Structures are given as C-alpha cells and as structure tokens.
Image (cartoon, grey):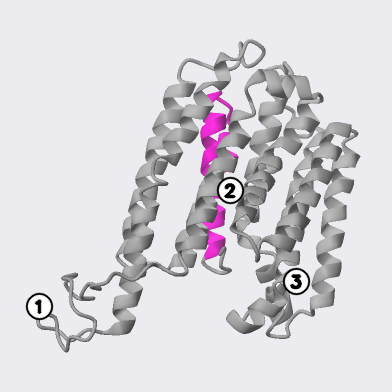
C-alpha cells in the first residue's frame, strides 16, 4: 500500500480530473465547431483521445520528480524518490512510457492533427521538466501544456486546424492557459515574501522593531515563527486579489463562442451566456471565500494552490454551460472530485 500510494503521490493523481475535464470540454467544443448535430455520441470511439493529455500529464508529473530528485532530497525528503519508496530510474521509465502512451492514444483516433498536437505536448512537458528549476519563464511552457490538454481533443473532433481557428473555440484553451500562468506565478512567489523594515506584530499587526521585547500596541511578546507565517499569508492574500477576476475573465472569453459564424447556431440557447456568467460569479465567490481562509491561516499554501488548480475544471464547466451543453455537469463533477482527492493526496 505504501508503494502504491507513492506512485499516486508522484503522479499528482488528485489533479488528474482537471485534465479529464479540460479534454471533455475541448472535445465537445471541437465537435460542435465542426457542425455536429445536437446529439453528441458519448460512445464515439474518438473519446479515447481523453487518455492522450491525461497520460502526458501523469507522465509529466512523474518525470518532474525524477528530474528534481536531487533538489527534493535537500528540500522535500519526504517525496517518493528521496524517501526511497520509488527509484529514480523507475520514475524515468514510467514517465517516458506514459508520454509515448499519450501519443499512441492520439494516433488511435486516426487524427493526424491530434497526434501532432500530442507530440508537441510531450515535447513541452519534457522541456518544462528539464528547465523549470533554472528559470521562472518555464511557467509559459506549463500554461501551453494546459492549453494543449483541451486543444488535442478539439483536433480529434474538429478534424482540421482551419475549423478550430475560425470558430472561436480557442478562447477556451486561452482561458486555461492564462489561469495556469497566473497561478504558477503565484505558486512560485509564495516561497519567500519580502521582509518589511518594521515587521507587523503577529498578534495585532502593528509595526514594531524587530528587536523589541514586546509590541507597543498590544503588549504581547512577538513569536518569530508566527510573524513569518502570517507575513507570508498576507503576501499571498495580496497576490490572490490579482487572480479574483479570472473566473469573470474566463466567462468573458466564453461569451465569444456563440457569436462565431461557423459554430453553435442551432445549439446555444439564449440562456447559455447568462448561466455562464452566473456560474462565473459563483466560482468567484467560492474563490474569494478560499482566499480569505488562506489569508487567515485556516488552510495552508499547498492546499490553496491545489484549489486554484481545481478551478481549471470550473472554467471548463463555464465554457459548456455557455453553449448549453449538459456535459458541463461532468466538468463540475471533476472540480468536486479534485477537491475531495486533494484531501488525501496533495495537489501541490
């Protein structure tokens, strides 16, 4: 059981439902962009394409730990490879096989465009895992990988690049990419918050000299550990406000979808955009609630970043609600399942 859990940890399996959600949304949008009828066949053999980005994601997570084994041995010795539960060599082999499996699943659909996009995803995954420890600019690669998780199924169902480019459905992977980029920047900046010349009292927040025996405002003695933790929480909360408009921005992206001259003419009902906006507002409220919990120390930074990853499935749900597609419910379920799984296996 310990070894099995180690593999689930190294695969970041709790985040995998978000990739499934991205792929479902991408496939649905690609199907209707091609001019599909109102009935979407859930037994269509092309749905195997969902496994292509999923394999690449899981393989990328495994290879991430394999490349970072020496760093983790110093900073996170409890991770599966440094703790000896998984060998580094096995991680490299499994990760490589998963990337190849992703390309094979794409090829099984018969779509050359989807296969090519999956190969690009595998290359981007390898590039990110190789360079992310050396440059912060690697977050751009991470954003591109998340966008490709939706573009690959789009390619399988839309069948040609012109349809994808002209129908407006690229707004969806663009929203995923922007969200991923911003949360990645936030996650990178959470490690070290700048120290203020007069750090706040950990109890009342009043500025105080670092060598003071007690706070001049509340009279309590400072606790350096508490002060540093709360300073980090405040810095994270400030950064978080920059992300709060993202669900609304995602909804704005989706509002362009029904306006396409090629797409959704007989499918998107008049209530779709309104429901999408309501869903975005609901997601924003949930996001604000989680940000406040993080700022007050009720949840830790890894849990909060994991929640932001789960929001990617919420963006998928907004996209499908906007065009009135019932599979939006499947994306919402992926959002909930991700949050539940993250309670057992950390998503970040």
Query: In terms of secondary structure, what is the magenta stretch mainly?
Result: helix
Residue 242 vs residue 271, the one in the foreground: 242
- Image quadrant assignment for residue 50: top right
Point out residue 232 in the picture as x, y percentages from the top left corner. Answer: 36, 68
Judged from the image, the secondary structure of the residue bearing numbered disc 1 is loop
Relative to 172, residue 133 above or below: below
Q: CA distance from mark 2 to mark 3?
A: 27 Å
Judged from the image, the secondary structure of the residue bearing numbered disc 2 is helix
The residue under label 3 is 66
Report whether residue 258 is seen.
Answer: yes
The residue under label 1 is 218
Point out residue 169 in the picture as x, y percentages from the top left corner. Answer: 64, 26
Q: Tag 1 or tag 2, which sits nearer the N-term?
A: 1
Residue 339 vs residue 161, the one in the foreground: 161
- Give the residue at x 16% y 89%: 213
Point out residue 265 in the picture as x, y percentages from the top left corner. Answer: 61, 11
Residues drawn in magenta: 314-342
Q: Is residue 326 magenta?
A: yes
Left or right of residue 232: residue 85: right
């Amino acid at each position: 059981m310990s070894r099995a859990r180690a593999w689930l940890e190294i695969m970041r399996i709790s985040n995998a439902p978000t990739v499934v959600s991205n792929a479902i949304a991408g496939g649905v949008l690609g199907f209707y962009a091609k001019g599909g009828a109102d009935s979407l066949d859930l037994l269509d053999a092309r749905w195997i394409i969902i496994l292509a980005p999923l394999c690449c994601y899981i393989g990328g997570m495994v290879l991430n730990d394999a490349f970072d084994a020496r760093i983790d041995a110093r900073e996170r010795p409890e991770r599966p490879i440094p703790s000896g539960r998984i060998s580094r060599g096995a991680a490299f082999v499994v990760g490589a096989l998963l990337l190849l499996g992703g390309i094979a699943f794409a090829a099984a659909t018969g779509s050359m465009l989807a296969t090519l996009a999956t190969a690009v995803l595998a290359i981007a995954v390898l590039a990110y895992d190789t360079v992310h420890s050396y440059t912060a600019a690697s977050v751009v690669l991470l954003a591109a990988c998340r966008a490709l998780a939706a573009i690959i199924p789009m390619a399988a169902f839309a069948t040609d690049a012109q349809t994808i480019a002209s129908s407006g459905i690229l707004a969806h992977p663009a929203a995923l990419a922007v969200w991923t980029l911003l949360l990645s920047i936030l996650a990178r900046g959470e490690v070290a918050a700048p120290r203020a010349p007069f750090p706040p009292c950990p109890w009342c927040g009043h500025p105080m000299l670092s060598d003071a025996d007690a706070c001049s405002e509340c009279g309590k003695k400072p606790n350096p550990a508490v002060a540093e933790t709360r300073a980090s929480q405040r810095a994270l909360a400030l950064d978080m406000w920059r992300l709060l408009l993202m669900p609304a921005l995602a909804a704005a992206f989706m509002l362009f979808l029904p306006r396409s001259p090629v797409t959704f003419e007989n499918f998107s009902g008049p209530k779709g955009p309104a429901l999408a906006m309501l869903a975005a507002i609901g997601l924003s409220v949930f996001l604000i609630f989680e940000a406040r919990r993080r700022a007050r120390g009720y949840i830790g930074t890894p849990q909060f970043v994991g929640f932001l990853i789960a929001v990617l499935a919420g963006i998928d749900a907004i996209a499908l609600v906007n065009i009135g597609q019932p599979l939006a419910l499947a994306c919402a379920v992926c959002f909930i399942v991700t949050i539940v799984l993250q309670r057992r296996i950390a998503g970040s």
